[in-house]
Image: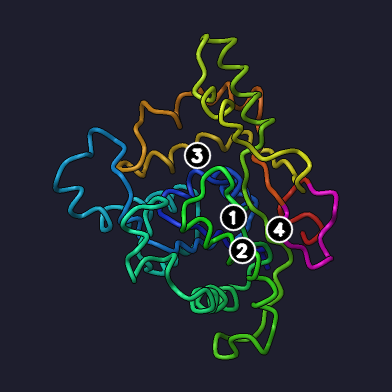
Amino acid sequence: MSLTILALHAHPDDESSKAAASVARLVDEGARAVLVTATGGEAGDILNPEMNVPEVARRLGEIRAVELEEAARIIGFDEVVMLGYRDSGMPDSSDNRREDAFCNQPIDEVLERVVEVVRRVRPDVVLGYDDHEFYPHPDHLRIHEISLELAAAAADPDRFPEAGDPWQIEAVYAPVFTRERILALHTAMLESTGESPFAVWLERGVGTEAERTLFKFDVTGYVDRGRKALAAHRTQVDPRGFWFAVPTPVIEAVYPWEDFELLYSNGSSSTDRDHPFSGIRE
């Protein structure tokens, strides 16, 4: 029986900007992949000038669901679960104050719904979020909270007994952007073009430090697939913008990995990781 990975994300497009190439590789290696998306992204900005028209703005939630379906197909997800919460918007926005915003829902209510999915699909590994120190979006912070509690809750028969039989997750990881990665791409772009889209990130001190529990996963040959998935979110990315500024050959030449922080291990996974399924592969 194949191993299963569950990716838990806040909005449509997050599954494509965070570890998409890794999930694509795992799928090609035989894993089953399940995507859980908490919100519909209704409060998102339209970042592609070609899509920034009133009709798209009016139907943004509906359109983003279609974009998500296509991106998930490209990556290779077997199932997409949309929890249906409303996007909370950026920090300190009026959307934060809506009663139906994801960030205002009781944590146990959200946790129970995710636990129910976990107990049904029985993932070996879950991808969640780190503390998002440099991007404190309320919905991302809520996913971080869920990521920290999920393994213990899913395995506890006394927590949410109506959500299914307990299930032990082997490991929970958070995809992260390390300073090492940002600096490598920044340097390569300066050397090849004299300009880098990462200069602002470095000035702001963005990037996870090396002392966090990390491993690198080689995604050579899968970077383009992740980018195609991201491009499917036409309302959210400008095809001439930041996310596509670094050519794929440059990425694969200087930093052909995606990085992960270990949030949880039940002890059966190897401490010397080079693969999300390290220590639990058949």
CA–CA distance in space, label 2 to label 1? 6 Å
Helix, strand or loop at label 2? It is: helix
Q: Amino acid at mark 2?
A: Ser
**Location of mark 2 (residue):** 147
Q: Amino acid at mark 3?
A: Arg
**Location of mark 3 (residue):** 225
270 part of magenta stretch: yes
The image shows residue 74, relative to residue 62, as above or below, that is above
The answer to the question of whether label 2 and label 4 lie on touching residues, with beta carbons closer than 8 A, is yes
Number of other residues with Cα within 10 Å of mark 3, as a class: few under 14, some 14 to 19, many 20 or more: many
**Location of mark 4 (residue):** 263
Q: Nearer the viewer, residue 64 or 112?
A: 112
Q: Amino acid at mark 4?
A: Leu
Helix, strand or loop at label 1? It is: loop
Tell me which numbered mark, 2 or 4, is placed earlier along the sequence.
2
Q: Residue at x 62, y 61 (%)?
A: 5
Q: Which residues are magenta?
A: 262-273
Q: Residue furthest left?
A: 54
CA–CA distance in space, label 2 to label 4? 8 Å
Question: Which-is-in-front pick, marks 1 and 3?
Answer: 1
Predominant secondary structure, magenta span: loop
Tell me which numbered mark, 2 or 1, is placed earlier along the sequence.
1
CA–CA distance in space, label 2 to label 3? 26 Å
Q: Quadrant of the C terminus?
A: bottom right
Percent position (x, y) of residue 123? 63, 68
The answer to the question of whether label 2 and label 1 lie on touching residues, with beta carbons closer than 8 A, is yes
